[in-house]
Amino acid sequence: MALADVQALVADLVRDDGDRISPEERDRAVTLAVARYSADRPRTAVQDVVAQGGSMLPLPPAWEPDISLLTAVEVPVGQVPPAYLPARSFWLYAAPGGLSIMLATSQPQGRQVRLSFLASHVLSDVEDTIPTLHREAVAAWAGSILLEQLANLHTNDGDSTIQADSVDRRSKGEQYAARARAAVKRYRELIGVADKPEQLPAGVQITWGPARPFVMPRRRL
């Protein structure tokens, strides 16, 4: 099973010899990793809805507020090539009764409309939408969460009266923190969102007097 595979990968990555990470904490980390992966690499879901007559359509059943994004509307369904509506001819429309889809053209009652939209990934014992190629990435993000927890546990353990023991605790905490950072880096490398250095703008536009904008060059240090 895909979920069991990811759980095993997380266990291999973390190597929690002291059993300080519970199965529940591991599962929560996997859930958070799937959510992070969904934000970086959302899947495309496809569902059909039935027009009620007019230009408004209901949202598809799997629509997720604040996550889903409508990407394509096919109507009528089944033509070759597919009859996709132009991107400027459909919108999300917010009304007091909730969110719906507005089309530029009216549709007869009972017509089937196929909607494509972005959605979160699913990882469970019975369903898996994460590509096999990216299972390691999801495990790496989950592992980074758990390694950060272990770093905090070792760093924040009770003060010791033996100085050498305190130094050892700090050393273990730093090691776990470094491994957590490495796991985050691995995740980003695997899915192609590696960190990029922040770029400062070449200039800043300000208003100079009432008439026209003036661009002030940024002075190099």
Image (cartoon, rainbow, N blue to C red):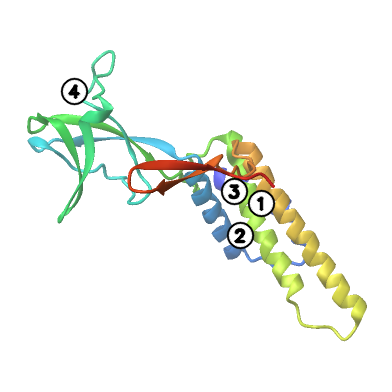
Nearer the camera: disc 3 or disc 1: 1
Judge whether residue 171 can be spotted in this image: yes
**Which residue was labeled with disc 2?**
26
Horizontal side of 90 relative to 174 (left or right) equals left
Mark 1–mark 2 Cα distance, whole angstroms, equals: 8 Å
Say if mark 1 contacts mark 2, CB within 8 Å: yes
Say if mark 3 contacts mark 1, CB within 8 Å: no
**Which residue was labeled with disc 4?**
76
Mark 1 belongs to which amino acid?
A: Val
Would you call the spot at circle 4 few (<14 residues within 10 Å), some (14-19), or many (20 or more)?
Answer: some
Q: Earlier in the sequence, mark 3 or mark 1?
A: 3
Mark 2 belongs to which amino acid?
A: Arg
Quadrant including the N terminus: top right
Would you call the spot at circle 1 few (<14 residues within 10 Å), some (14-19), or many (20 or more)?
Answer: many
**Which residue was labeled with disc 1?**
10
Horizontal side of 143 relative to 210 (left or right) equals right
Q: Residue furthest bottom?
A: 161
Nearer the camera: disc 3 or disc 4: 4
Nearer the camera: disc 4 or disc 2: 4
Q: In the picture shown, does residue 10 fall above or below 47? A: below
Mark 4–mark 2 Cα distance, whole angstroms, equals: 46 Å
Q: Position of residue 144 (x, y in %)?
A: 66, 55
Mark 4 belongs to which amino acid?
A: Pro
Q: Position of residue 170 (x, y in %)?
A: 82, 70
Mark 3 belongs to which amino acid?
A: Ala
Q: Quadrant of residue 24?
A: bottom right
